[in-house]
Amino acid sequence: MSETSFAENCDTVISLGAHCETAEQIARFFGKKTNGPFDWMITPVDSVCKILEDDGQHLGQKLVAGWQGKSIQCNYYGCVYFHEFDRIDDGRVLFDIDALTRLREKMLHKMGTLIKSYRSSNNVLFVRAHGKSDAPGDRMQTEPLRSADLNRLVEVIRSKAPDLNFRLLFARADGRDNESFELNEPLAKEIIVREVRNPQNLGWQGDEETWANALESLGFVRAGVDAS
C-alpha cells in the first residue's frame, strides 16, 4: 500500500508521545483531539513499550514526587506525570490520595480508549515526536534515542495487533535535538521519518507548519482544506 493510499484509508491517528506537542499537533491538523495516555505524559520510548506490552495495568501506580515536589515520576514505567496534577503557587504538585485515585481512573480510561481504538481499526497512524522536554525528571534530556528503540516500539505494536496495518511517523526535531538521535541500525519498514522545527521560542506546542508539512507529505489532508 502506497503512503497516499494508506492516508486515504487510515482509520485512526494515535499519539505515542514523547510529550504533549504530539497530541497538540495531531489535534490542530486533524481538527479533533486524541484521547490516550501518552497525550500529556513525558514518555521515553522504553516507557511506551512497557505500557503497551502490559496494557498499562500499572498506570498511576508506584509514583514518587521529586525535584522539589514539582514533578511526579513513575517508578514502574519510567515516565513523568508533569501535567496531570494541580499545583500550588510555587509550582509544587498537590500529591494526595484523592489526586492519585483520580489519576489512576483517568489513565486507565485513556488506556482503554487507546486499546479499543487500534483493535477496532484496520489502518492506524501512530505518531511519535523526538526532542526532550524541559520537565524535571525527563530522562530524554540525557539519554539518546536510537533507531533500535523505535524498532522495538514497532515490534511491540506488531505483537499487540498482528493483523493491523500501521505506520509510525517519527517527527524528528531539527537543530540541537538531532544530536540525541543515533541511527544504530536500519529502521523498520513501518517507520517514516520527517523533520519538524523545534525552536525554543515556540514553546511546548511546536511548529504547526512543519508538522503539517510532515503529515501532508504522507497524503493526509488538513482539516478544513479541500482535498480535491
Image (cartoon, rainbow, N blue to C red):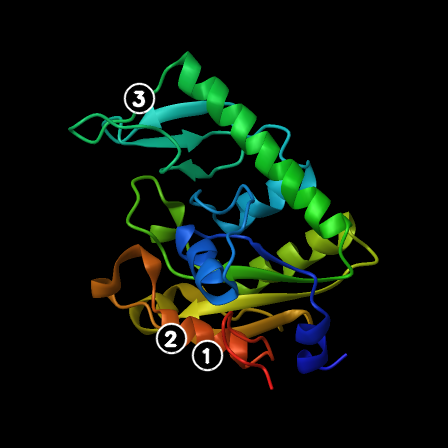
Is tag 2's residue or tag 3's residue first in the polypeptide sequence? Answer: 3
Query: In the displayed structure, does residue 203 sit left or right of residue 35?
Result: left
Residue plotted at (44% across, 42% down)? 41
Of residues 195 and 228, the one nearer the viewer is 228
Which numbered disc flags the more N-terminal residue, 1 or 3?
3
Instruction: Say if residue 142 shows up in the picture.
Output: no
Label 3: few (<14), some or many (≥20) within 10 Å?
Answer: some
**Where does residue 181 sit, x and y in percent of width and height?**
44, 66
Q: Residues within 10 Å of mark 1 (few under 14, many from 20)?
A: some
Q: Distance between the residues labelled 1 and 3?
A: 39 Å
Res 94 label: 3
The residue at the far bottom in this view is 228
Question: What element does badge 2 sit on?
Answer: helix
Q: What element carries label 3?
A: loop
Instruction: Please state the horizontal and vertical placement of residue 20, each as a whole percent of the image.
Output: 41, 51
Q: What residue type is labelled 2?
A: Glu
List the residue tagged with mark 1.
Answer: 213
Q: How many residues crowd mark 2 within 10 Å: few (<14), some (14–19), many (20+)?
A: few
Q: Residue at x 30, y 21 (%)?
A: 94
Pick the quarter of the image with the N terminus: bottom right
Q: Mark 1 is on which residue type?
A: Asn
Which part of the image, by quadrant, shows the C terminus?
bottom right
How far apart marks 2 and 1 lie (CA) works out to: 6 Å
Circles 2 and 1, Cβ within 8 Å, touching? The answer is yes
**Furthest-left residue in view?**
90
Figure check: 94 above or below 123: above
Q: Residue at x 49, y 18 (%)?
A: 101
Amino acid tagged 3: Leu
Distance between the alpha carbons at the discs numbered 2 and 3:
36 Å
Q: Is residue 70 left or right of residue 113?
A: left
Which residue occupies 63% across, 55% down?
153
Badge number at residue 209:
2
